Amino acid sequence: MTDVGTLHAPMKVEFDYTRSLGPTLSEFMTGLKRRQILGGTLSDGTVAVPPPEYDPHTYDPVTGLVPVSDEGVVQTWAWVPEPVPGQPLDRPFAFAQVVLDGADRPLLHAVAVDSADQIETGMRVRARWADETLGAITDIRWFEPLDDSPAMTPDAESGEPVTGIISPVHLAYDFAASPEESAFFRGLAEGRILGQRCPVCEKVYVPPRGACPVDGVPTTTVVEVPDTGIVTTFCIVNVPFLGQKITPPYVSAYMLLDGADIAFLHLLLGVDPADVRMGMRVKAVWKPRDEWGTTIENISHFEPTGEPDADFETYKVHL
């Protein structure tokens, strides 16, 4: 196959991060749900918003929470000309340090203005609350310049206590493979497994790394290895998780291919997890040819060959 440059592909990492709150942040988040902002009184007499869980001077838990205003003064700010998904506004806005009336330390949040010349240090702002509050910092949608409109009266009676929060995590980026990795992936698209050999120690790295981590020299000699090998170490997965494609229990194992000096992680199926062992001989199970691409997922999984196990002495240095 002709080399047409390095490969790249969009990648996404998404999951919900769940955190249980201690007494301090639980009270703070419960206050936000009730459209009330609480600050923590520190040992030096200052009030911090949001309240830290522990005093930075005495290291004692912060327990004295006091209400502060949802109005305050911009201390400093930075303009965001091109918002990204997940930010408070989908149009240009400012991130600002806002010192709320009754607090001594600033709160970082968004300020909704149409242009950078409409915000300045010392400007008074007021919180814009969400129509439905849940007990999160996003209950304050943003701050906006203070005007003569009436302020919203906080409802200090409604809302159950908030003891935990769920924060969706979304990371999207473009993954660019190295030239050596690109050659490896193109080899997989042809049903071949390619590695590279170090010219000094002659170790074969699969997938190739481009340089030997032992000798620090380029690995330029391409080596094709078979799709058979042994299990070195493994893990039996018993716990389900979001996005899981296989029902537990199943085995995730490091496969040391014949002729290679480094193992790589893949699925091991076709065997009772209780019967998996180090040194077990395995072979790759490829997906149908019309489903191949430039991806390690061309190999659906590995499964035992039924051959005798490898002797520990033959692979102990590869663990």
Image: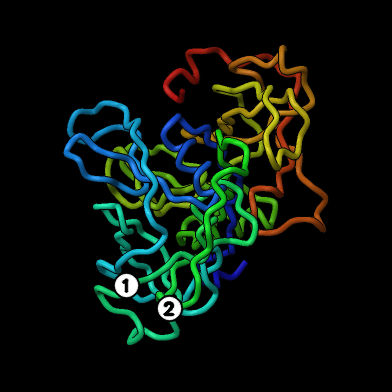
Measured as percent of width and height from the top left, residue 224 is found at: 57, 46
User: Is residue 87 among the parts visible in the rendering?
Assistant: no
Residue at label 1? 78
Q: Is residue 31 above or below residue 231?
A: below
Q: Is residue 58 above or below residue 168?
A: above
Left or right for 175, reference 131: left
Residue closer to the observer: 1 or 12: 12
User: Is residue 295 among the parts visible in the rendering?
Assistant: yes
Left or right for 179, reference 105: right
| Residue type at tag 2 | Asp
Q: Quadrant of residue 125?
A: bottom left
Q: Is residue 151 above or below residue 284?
A: below
Measured as percent of width and height from the top left, residue 274 is found at: 71, 12
Q: CA distance from mark 2 to mark 1?
A: 22 Å
Work out whether mark 2 precedes mark 1 in sequence or the reverse, and give the earlier one: 1
Task: Name the image quarter holding the N terminus.
Answer: bottom right
